[in-house]
Image (spheres, rainbow, N blue to C red):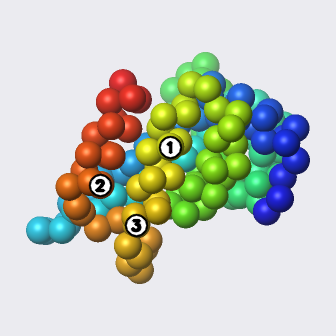
């Protein structure tokens, strides 16, 4: 998808403040899988609907179970979809720049399985730890 520089810079600003770039680690028996993800979550409905529409992404609604909490929306990009989106906004990122570079690198070395998870290797484990440390 081709998005305008104006939208990409605007979206990068939102991603820097409201986004999360992470790598989910799953252990199944003797195998370890890594699933890189990029998500944006916020309570401003119009903004989230605009992001979902422009990025052609699914929008998830969350209704909190505790009093006085607001409804919020999430757009999430997994694996290669996340890589493609991050590559477009990378020039405009500031706060999440390093995490984005690591996720892009992880996706480039990804070996595909049915779910698109990354099979375990020492490099993938190192990248996982780097992103985890940056997100502290």
Disc 2 to disc 1, how far (Cα)?
A: 13 Å
Disc 3 to disc 2, how far (Cα)?
A: 9 Å
- The image shows residue 16 at horizontal and vertical percentages of 62, 29
| Quarter of the view holding residue 17 | top right
Determine the secondary structure under disc 2.
helix
| Above/below status of 3 relative to 16 | below
Residue bearing the label numbered 2 = 124
Determine the secondary structure under disc 3.
loop
| Above/below status of 72 relative to 49 | above
Q: Is residue 41 visible?
A: no
104 horizontally vs 63: left or right? left
Task: Mark 2 or mark 1: name the one nearer the start of the chain.
Answer: 1
- Neighbor class of circle 2 (other Cα within 10 Å; few <14, some 14-19, many 20+) is many
Disc 3 to disc 1, how far (Cα)?
A: 14 Å
| Above/below status of 31 relative to 53 | below
Q: Residue at x 53, y 58 (%)?
A: 78
Task: Mark 3 or mark 2: name the one nearer the start of the chain.
Answer: 3
Q: Residue at x 50, y 52 (%)?
A: 104
Residue bearing the label numbered 1 = 101
Near-viewer residue (135 or 72)? 135
- Neighbor class of circle 3 (other Cα within 10 Å; few <14, some 14-19, many 20+) is many
111 horizontally vs 50: left or right? left
- The image shows residue 21 at horizontal and vertical percentages of 50, 41
Q: Which mark is residue 80?
A: none
State the residue lying farthest toward the left.
30
- The image shows residue 56 at horizontal and vertical percentages of 77, 60
Which quarter of the rendering shows the C terminus? top left
């Amino acid at each position: 998808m081709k998005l305008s520089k104006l939208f990409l810079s605007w979206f990068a600003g939102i991603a820097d403040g409201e986004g999360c770039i992470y790598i989910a680690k799953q252990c199944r028996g003797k195998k370890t899988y890594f699933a890189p993800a990029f998500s944006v979550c916020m309570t401003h409905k119009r903004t989230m609907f605009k992001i979902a529409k422009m990025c052609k992404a699914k929008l998830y609604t969350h209704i909190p179970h505790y009093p006085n909490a607001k409804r919020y929306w999430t757009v999430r990009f997994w694996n290669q979809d996340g890589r493609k989106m991050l590559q477009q906004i990378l020039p405009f990122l500031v706060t999440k720049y390093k995490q984005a570079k690591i996720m892009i690198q992880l996706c480039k070395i990804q070996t595909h399985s049915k779910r698109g998870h990354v099979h375990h290797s020492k490099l993938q484990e190192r990248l996982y730890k780097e992103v985890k440390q940056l997100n502290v």
